Image: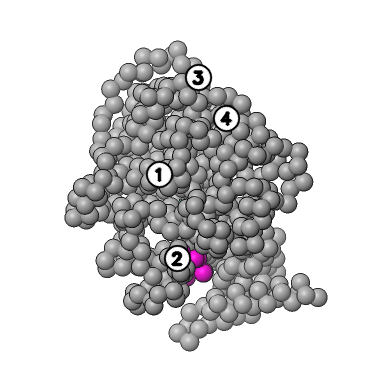
């Protein structure tokens, strides 16, 4: 399995080492360094419980020891699906210590997504949350075993009577005290540490192998750009597994700097404001729709949010209007973050002028990031003009897992990753995201591959054809619109309710359901016979605008 991960070419590896980007340390060392130098500092606050670096390291070591005893070892894979909580980090570091490679699924991932990860990784282990409906009983894991014959261990966080409880494993410490000093097999920093999730634009979600060396560098460099230290008190409100709150600089950045992560269940004002006040949070990361909710919230007046110094915003384009409101009304510095789980992360710098902070999505965090803005023939566009963003560097991956064909299209011959973003450079050289040339809907930071939704709709016996596109939305930026052509002699008339019930039954994550269906006779085609999605996007945008104007 691991052999199918694309490696960096030898000459790049040598250069990245020589220049100090790759330091041959493993991700578990982020925690172990603090364990040595700062053991009594608070690493994580979850639900009022304060956990020191010593505690986090000890519990990660114990869990690793327990898993080792169960037969897990370096190179095995795992699926982890946990909410924003202390255990997420215990599990992350436990698996890193053991060199077991997880994919960290999002909590809103459902049967289809988890089944796909199981097929891709053939995991031996699942660690999930007992509150997730899929794990209410053993039915789903039995089903998963058909796709993952190696699956032998399921640990659930919380109470359950059908399987081992992760919480027990973490807290019944007496029973595995003896694992505290288990000698773990050391592995190599060039190896894959875990798989990150891509928002994707194809029928099946793609996994992104991230190595210790490349990810560790992205965390260190992010900490440098953001100037984090032991005083950093970071509210993790976006899903902990997402690349942004994990590594830009995110929780791993906090741990590297010796600060404190405060776990919030979600980014809503009612979840976050009290935590900010209580724990004197000074940094957080949001997606644009959460910014709108924060600014429009009545609750803002009831809390003292004055400790907040910087709010990072990324995942989807932030409007200049919202950017200005954020800084004025919350009295914070805005940092725009334009990143991708595949690698490249751009930040506006804390001392950038106001125009740059409000109107650009930042610039690459590393001098080693190579950026080329090109046309569809991979030729550089003239300075200042919009084109496709392609990039290569010491923390941008070189290929999706098991996706040889797709990789041919996703990379240029020179190994630049084609992000699918249409960007231009501002006069000062910062990136401005203009749009997208990938078949994806960005629902306020949640990416949905159109093809994945189309495949589910096409499985319905009464659907003859369909096309899924983005439609404008004032809160989320975009929502999902499905254009559906019914079969001529369909047994039942197609409705939104029936189609949504159908895809729910197939186990697609909720956030991927179309928000609107348009039933039409035929799909418009381009001259070369492809579905004309541009025409469909224009059609639905005009329709919505005309309704609003009435
Ligand atoms: P993913 O590959 O799923 O990690 O998603 C990364 C994509 O999210 C980027 O390629 C962009 O399309 C989008 N994105 C992330 N941050 C921003 C931002 N600040 N502004 C606009 N688009 C963004
Ligand atoms: O959207 C993203 O994937 C993203 C946004 C900001 C990201 O991966 C990141 C920062 O690291």
Mark 2, residue position: 428
Classified by dominant secondary structure, the portion drawn in magenta counts as strand
Mark 4, residue position: 46
Q: Nearer the viewer, mark 4 or mark 3?
A: 4
Q: Nearer the viewer, mark 3 or mark 2?
A: 2
User: Gap between marks 4 and 3, in whole Å?
Assistant: 15 Å
User: Gap between marks 3 and 2, in whole Å?
Assistant: 53 Å
Would residue 375 be counted in the magenta stretch?
no
Camera sees residue 257: yes
Along the polypeptide, which appears first: circle 2 or circle 4?
4
| Badge 2 density bin: few <14, some 14–19, many ≥20, Cα 10 Å | few
Label 3 CB sits under 8 Å from any ligand 2 atom:
no
| Badge 4 density bin: few <14, some 14–19, many ≥20, Cα 10 Å | some
Which residue is painted at 65% across and 62% down in the image?
321
Task: Describe residue 492's horizontal placement relative to residue 414 as left or right.
Answer: right
Numbered disc total? 4
Mark 3, residue position: 171
Question: Which residues, given as a range, are shown in magenta?
Answer: 431-437
Which residue is painted at 49% across and 66% down in the image?
432
Task: Describe residue 258's horizontal placement relative to residue 391 as left or right.
Answer: right
Along the polypeptide, which appears first: circle 3 or circle 2?
3
Q: Which residue is the extreme one toward the bottom? A: 527
Mark 1, residue position: 224
Instruction: Find out whether the residues at labels 4 and 3 contact each other: C-beta distance under 8 Å.
Output: no
Along the polypeptide, which appears first: circle 3 or circle 1?
3
Task: Describe residue 77's horizontal placement relative to residue 314 as left or right.
Answer: left
């Amino acid at each position: 399995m691991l052999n199918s991960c694309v490696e960096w070419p030898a000459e790049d590896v040598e250069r990245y080492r020589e220049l100090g980007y790759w330091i041959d340390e493993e991700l578990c060392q982020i925690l172990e360094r603090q364990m040595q130098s700062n053991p009594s500092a608070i690493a994580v606050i979850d639900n009022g419980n304060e956990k020191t670096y010593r505690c986090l390291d000890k519990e990660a070591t114990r869990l690793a020891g327990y898993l080792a005893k169960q037969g897990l070892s370096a190179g095995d894979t795992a699926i982890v699906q946990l909410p924003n909580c202390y255990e997420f980090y215990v599990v992350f570091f436990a698996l890193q210590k053991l060199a077991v490679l997880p994919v960290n699924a999002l909590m809103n991932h459902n049967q289809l997504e988890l089944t796909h990860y199981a097929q891709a990784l053939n995991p031996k282990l699942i660690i999930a949350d007992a509150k997730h409906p899929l794990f209410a009983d053993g039915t789903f894991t039995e089903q998963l075993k058909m796709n993952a014959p190696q699956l032998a261990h399921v640990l659930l966080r919380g109470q359950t009577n059908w399987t081992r409880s992760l919480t027990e494993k973490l807290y019944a410490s007496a029973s595995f005290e003896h694992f505290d000093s288990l000698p773990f097999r050391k592995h190599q920093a060039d190896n894959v540490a875990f798989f990150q999730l891509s928002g994707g634009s194809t029928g099946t979600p793609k996994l992104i192998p991230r190595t210790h060396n490349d990810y560790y560098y992205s965390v260190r460099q992010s900490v440098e750009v953001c100037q984090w230290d032991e005083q950093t008190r970071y509210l993790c409100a976006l899903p902990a597994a997402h690349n942004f709150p994990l590594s830009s600089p995110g929780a791993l950045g906090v741990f590297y700097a010796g600060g404190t992560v405060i776990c919030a269940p979600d980014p809503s004002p009612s979840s976050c404001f009290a935590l900010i006040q209580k724990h004197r949070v000074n940094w957080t990361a949001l997606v644009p729709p959460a910014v709108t909710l924060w600014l429009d919230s009545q609750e803002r007046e009831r809390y003292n949010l004055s400790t907040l110094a910087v709010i990072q915003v990324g995942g989807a384009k932030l409007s200049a209007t919202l950017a200005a409101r954020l800084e004025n009304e919350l009295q914070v510095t805005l940092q725009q973050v334009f990143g991708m789980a595949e690698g490249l992360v751009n930040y506006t710098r804390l001392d950038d002028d106001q125009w740059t902070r409000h109107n650009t999505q930042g610039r690459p965090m590393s001098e080693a990031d190579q950026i080329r803005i090109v046309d569809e023939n991979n030729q550089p566009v003239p300075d200042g003009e919009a084109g496709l963003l392609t990039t290569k560097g010491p923390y941008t991956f070189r290929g999706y897992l098991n996706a040889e064909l797709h990789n041919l299209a996703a990379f240029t011959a020179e190994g630049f990753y084609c992000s699918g973003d249409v960007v231009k450079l501002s006069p000062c050289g910062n990136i401005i995201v203009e749009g997208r040339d990938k078949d994806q809907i960005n629902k306020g930071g949640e990416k949905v591959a159109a093809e994945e939704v189309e495949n589910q709709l096409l499985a319905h016996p009464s659907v003859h054809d369909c096309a899924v596109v983005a439609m404008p939305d004032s809160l989320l930026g975009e929502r999902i619109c499905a254009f559906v052509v019914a079969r001529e002699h369909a047994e039942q008339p197609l409705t939104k309710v029936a189609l949504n019930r159908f895809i729910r039954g197939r186990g697609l994550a909720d956030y991927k359901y179309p928000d609107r269906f348009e039933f039409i006779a035929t799909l418009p085609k381009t001259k070369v016979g492809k579905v004309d999605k541009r025409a469909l996007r224009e059609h639905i945008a005009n329709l919505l605008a005309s309704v609003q104007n009435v």
